[in-house]
């Protein structure tokens, strides 16, 4: 079984993208903060041009004026602009404004229309981090509305929240068991089609916001309060105790949240090497005896088979979950890799946890500005590293010399050019460069691009909507590969005096 390895440094990764994908065709032209006054004038003159609103939003984003960027980008999207740059920049802006729900929505819409496979890959990683932030925001909102939630008493029928076990021992080396066992219990409770089981991350995030120590997890009042905030019908909570050097005991209680009364208690014990048997008996007995749900033979067999063969690997897995909850993503990844090396056959949940830790590591190490750089380098905006310069750049070029007609010679025939200037039969006008910067967007399949043509207006430009090297089979499995360097050809047509090419 293959597991993700540790990710390389983010700056090296982004540099590789910039160098290896430099010839990707682009979307909207790149803009900078200095372009804001010009774009504002153009938007005022053409308020129905949603692409101008997107470019203005991009410029405001780069100026770190995120609220102004949000207004422009949301206006474009509301007007029907469903391009990759619109959703990508809107997602980045909402992320900076910490509107996690809106950021998730914009990023998810980008995944459906984005033209850059590398940018889509980066967005998927950011969505993992945003998911955690969204859980935290929801927990904070629940706490702020605790009185209203308690008053309504709304619950989700047949739902179960498994709180982390409290740890009653001085064996610090065994403390990761409480994370691993709780996670395994959640997985096993999910086997029953009659139950709705809350996710571990959702529960842990709420407990973190409640600022509870592990000792508080076993208090009846804690379970009732957490259950109400989670709108769960039942809360499973318990204590893991070590007896001697090698014996474990779990005392569990299931709380009925609406009645604030115990639905029943049970105790199971085992030696350390048989802890999986202990956990299976706890889950099966809880489902049958305390929740009153009958398991099918197939469901019971699935629960019994969900186990690891190596206790040390299970401990490492629990250590990884603990570090993941604490935000130590590199440490979590190291623990998961240790678990994978000790348990070559794998374990249900380990591969998912490793992928989550890797995504969180990458996303936490990169800013939204880095994502904007990936989009620019890989053709979502601009045209990769070979993109035409921004309008601000071309305006600077235009200040150096007056525009000359295409075909006008920079030197008189037979005249020796000034020192440092190469003889050239013709010169590209500054106005042509400006036109390129303001809207010429070559199609991704074009083998040549005539920058000297004046017959093609910006309104006739073909917008890029797909990657040049997408692999449908890989995309069906969400495993898009980074395309290789495209061999773009640019042909500049310069007309000499007399009409000769």
Image: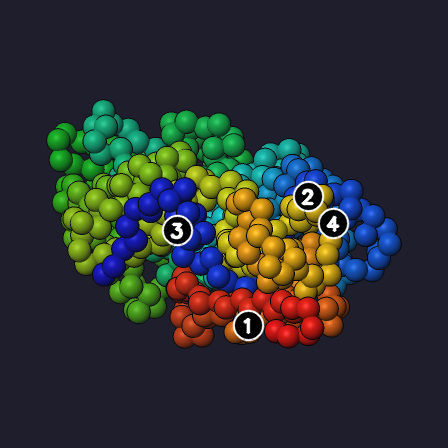
Q: Residue furthest top?
A: 170
- The residue beneath circle 1 is 448
- Where is residue 324, by image quadrant? top left
Q: Residue at x 41, y 75 (%)?
A: 473
Camera-side residue of 351 and 347: 351
Nearest to the eye among marks 2 and 3: give it. 2
Q: Which residue is at the front of the view, 471 or 28?
A: 28
Task: Tell me if I can see residue 170 in this picture.
Answer: yes
State yes or no: discs 1 and 4 in contact (Cβ < 8 Å).
no
Q: Earlier in the sequence, mark 3 or mark 1?
A: 3
Q: CA distance from mark 1 to mark 4?
A: 28 Å
Q: Which residue is mark 4?
A: 402
User: How far is mark 2 from mark 3, CA to CA?
Assistant: 34 Å
Q: Earlier in the sequence, mark 1 or mark 2?
A: 2
The crowding category of the residue bearing disc 3, from other C-alpha atoms within 10 Å (few below 14, some 14 to 19, many at least 20), is few
Q: CA distance from mark 3 to mark 1?
A: 25 Å
Q: Left or right of 190: which side holds 271? A: left
Residue hosting label 3: 16
The spot of residue 167 in percent (x, y) is: 30, 31
For residue 400, the mark is 2
Image quadrant for the C terminus? Answer: bottom right
């Amino acid at each position: 079984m293959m597991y993700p390895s540790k990710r390389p440094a983010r700056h090296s990764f982004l540099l590789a993208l910039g160098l290896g994908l430099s010839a990707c065709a682009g979307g909207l032209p790149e803009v900078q903060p200095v372009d804001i006054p010009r774009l504002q004038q153009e938007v005022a003159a053409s308020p129905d041009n949603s692409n101008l609103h997107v470019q203005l939003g991009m410029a405001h984003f780069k100026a770190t004026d995120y609220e102004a960027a949000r207004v422009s980008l949301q206006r474009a999207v509301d007007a029907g602009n469903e391009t990759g740059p619109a959703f990508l920049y809107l997602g980045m802006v909402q992320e900076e404004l910490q509107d996690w729900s809106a950021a998730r929505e914009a990023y998810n819409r980008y995944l459906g229309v984005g033209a850059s496979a590398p940018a889509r890959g980066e967005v998927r990683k950011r969505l993992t981090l945003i998911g955690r932030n969204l859980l935290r925001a929801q927990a904070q909102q629940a706490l702020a509305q605790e009185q209203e939630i308690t008053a309504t008493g709304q619950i989700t029928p047949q739902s179960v929240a498994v709180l982390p076990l409290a740890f009653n021992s001085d064996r610090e080396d065994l403390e990761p068991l409480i994370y691993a066992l709780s996670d395994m219990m959640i997985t096993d409770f999910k086997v029953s089609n009659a139950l709705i089981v809350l996710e571990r991350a959702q529960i842990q995030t709420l407990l973190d916001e409640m600022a509870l120590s592990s000792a508080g997890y076993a208090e009846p009042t804690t379970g009732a309060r957490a259950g109400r905030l989670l709108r769960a019908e039942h809360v499973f909570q318990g204590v893991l105790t070590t007896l001697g050097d090698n014996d474990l005991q779990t005392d569990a209680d299931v709380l009925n949240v609406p009645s604030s009364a115990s639905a029943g208690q049970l105790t199971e014990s085992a030696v350390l090497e048989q802890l999986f048997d202990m956990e299976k008996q706890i889950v099966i007995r809880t489902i049958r005896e305390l929740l009153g749900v009958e398991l099918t033979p197939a469901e019971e067999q699935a629960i019994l088979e969900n186990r690891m063969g190596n206790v040390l690997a299970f401990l490492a897995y629990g250590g990884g979950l603990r570090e993941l909850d604490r935000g130590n993503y590199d440490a979590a990844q190291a623990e998961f890799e240790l678990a994978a090396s000790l348990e070559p056959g794998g374990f249900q949940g380990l591969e998912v946890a490793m992928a989550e830790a890797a995504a969180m590591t990458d996303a936490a190490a990169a800013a939204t500005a880095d994502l904007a750089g990936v989009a620019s380098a890989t053709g979502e905006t601009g045209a990769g590293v070979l993109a035409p310069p921004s309008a601000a750049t071309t305006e600077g070029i235009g200040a150096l010399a007056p525009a000359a007609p295409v075909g006008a010679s920079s030197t008189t025939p037979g005249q020796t050019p000034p020192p440092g200037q190469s003889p050239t039969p013709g010169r590209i006008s500054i106005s042509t460069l400006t036109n390129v910067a303001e809207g010429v967007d070559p199609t991704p399949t074009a083998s040549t691009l005539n920058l000297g043509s004046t017959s093609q207006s910006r309104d006739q430009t073909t917008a890029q909507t797909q990657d040049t090297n997408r692999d449908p089979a890989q995309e069906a499995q969400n495993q898009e590969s980074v395309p290789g360097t495209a061999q773009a050809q640019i042909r500049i047509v310069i007309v000499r005096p007399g009409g000769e090419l």
